[in-house]
Image: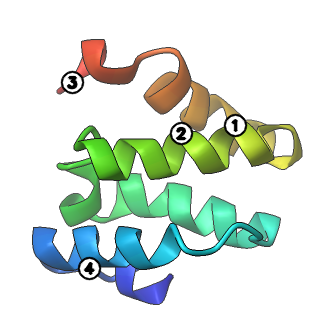
Amino acid sequence: MARLCNSGAFATTHKAIADLTKFSDFEIAEVEQLLDAVKDNDQVGWIKYDPDVSEFYRTIISEYKLRLTSKHRKFAAELFLEGGDDEKE
């Protein structure tokens, strides 16, 4: 997870996502860190709608959304559940 949060290259982001998709059980704090990576790390944020990145985030959000803080739940909904590809920056 740290590799994704600290990613300095798109290739590193894609590799980190590929590695993270092998896991299915995250602590809620980890999910919130993963969401923070989208807004705090440009390398993640800029490619958030790439198919692999978007699918990973949509999957974890749908599984954990009810346990997220309201701030993270709102961010997740705006970013991946309600906006999606239609609201690319």
In the image, what residue type sits under mark 1? Ser
Q: Is residue 10 left or right of residue 13?
A: left
Residue 3 pos. (x, y %): 37, 87
Residue most extreme to the bottom = 2
Q: CA distance from mark 4 to mark 2?
A: 20 Å
Instruction: First in sequence, mark 4 or 3: give its number.
Output: 4
Q: Nearer the viewer, mark 4 or mark 2?
A: 2
Above or below, comparing residue 64 to residue 76 in the picture: below
Closer mark to the observer between disc 4 and disc 1: 1
Residue bearing the label numbered 1: 62
Which residue is at 36% across, 61% downward?
A: 40
Colour setup of the view: rainbow
Q: Residue at x 42, y 16 (%)?
A: 83
Q: Nearer the viewer, residue 22 or 35?
A: 22
Which residue is denoted by mark 3 in the rendering?
88
Give the mark toward the camera: 2 or 3.
Answer: 2
Quote the CA–CA distance across marks 2 and 3: 15 Å
Q: Are marks 1 and 2 in contact (CB under 8 Å)?
A: yes
Badge 3: residue crowd in 10 Å (few <14, some 14–19, many ≥20): few
Amino acid type, residue under disc 3 in the picture: Lys
The mark nearer the N terminus, 4 or 2, is 4
| Mark 2 surroundings: few (<14), some (14-19) or many (≥20) residues within 10 A | some
Q: Could you tell which of marks 4 and 1 lies nearer the N-terminus?
A: 4
Helix, strand or loop at mark 3: loop
Query: Residue tagged by mark 4?
Result: 7
The residue type indicated by label 4 comes to Ser
At 78% across and 48% down in the image, what residue appears? 64
Quarter assignment of residue 55: top left
Q: Where does the image place residue 49, in percent across and percent down from the top left?
A: 27, 38
